[in-house]
Every structure is written in structure tokens, then in C-alpha cells.
Amino acid sequence: MAKASSDRNTIDLFGKSPGRPRSQPLTRKDQLKINKRAQREKEKAQGLKRLELLIEQEVLEKLDQLCDLKGLKRAEWLTLQVNSSLTNSKTTKSKKTVAKAIR
């Protein structure tokens, strides 16, 4: 049975299945895996390092509240705290060094 090109009522027996064509040959799971790998490589190129941290739920909620108040992400807030602690310890050490030099 041949199908005429002008026949719109007959099911297309020889063509592709009806519906939206596949835009990506990979499964969603594989796509996510590839995208996550690309994200990690991008972060590594930017000089970022992943850190896993285990803390109590109560402390995490407090951290989230602090971040909301400042309008920062957790990583940004932690980075600021580490930098300010280093700055404070350097100034404290330099004050002690100056005090020792004066004596």
C-alpha cells in the first residue's frame, strides 16, 4: 500500500513517529552529569574549592538568618568571616609586636 503525498488522512507508515522531535540524544540523567562536571571545572578555573561542612541544624538555621540579614550567600558570608578573622588576628599580633618593641 503506497501513500500519496497529498493524502492527509492516512497515517504516515514510513516516516518518524508523531510528536516533538528529540532535541537532545542524551537522557536527562546524563545531561545533568555532564553539566555538573562542567560546573565543577568552571569553578576550579575560577580558583574556587569545594568544601563540605557538617553542622547542627540549629546552627545552620542561625547561619541562614545571618545571611538573610546581610543579603549574602552562605559561602560569601563564611569567606567574609574568615577574612575578617585573619585581619583581626594580624592587627592583634602587630599591636603585641609594637608593645614588645616599646618595652
Image (spheres, rainbow, N blue to C red):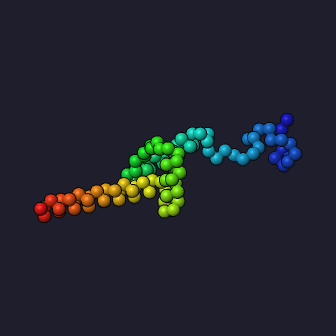
The structure residue drawn at horizontal position 53% and vertical position 45%, both measured from the top left corner, is: 57
Q: Nearer the viewer, residue 80 or 23?
A: 80
In the rendering, at what x and y percent does residue 83 appear? 35, 57
Q: Is residue 91 left or right of residue 66?
A: left
Q: Is residue 15 visible?
A: no
In the rendering, at what x and y percent does residue 73 appear? 49, 56
Quarter containing the N terminus: top right
> What is the residue that sits farthest to the top in this orientation?
1
Q: Count the numbered circles shown.
A: 0
The structure residue drawn at horizontal position 17% and vertical position 62%, both measured from the top left corner, is: 99
Q: Nearer the viewer, residue 100 or 91?
A: 100
The structure residue drawn at horizontal position 12% and vertical position 62%, both measured from the top left corner, is: 103
In the rendering, at what x and y percent does residue 43 appear? 43, 50
Q: Is residue 48 left or right of residue 63?
A: left
The structure residue drawn at horizontal position 76% and vertical position 43%, both measured from the top left corner, is: 18
State the image quarter where residue 88 is shown.
bottom left
In the rendering, at what x and y percent does residue 23 appear? 64, 47
Q: Is residue 27 left or right of residue 93?
A: right
Q: Is residue 65 visible?
A: yes
> What is the residue that sits farthest to the front in this orientation?
103
Q: Is residue 21 left or right of residue 96?
A: right
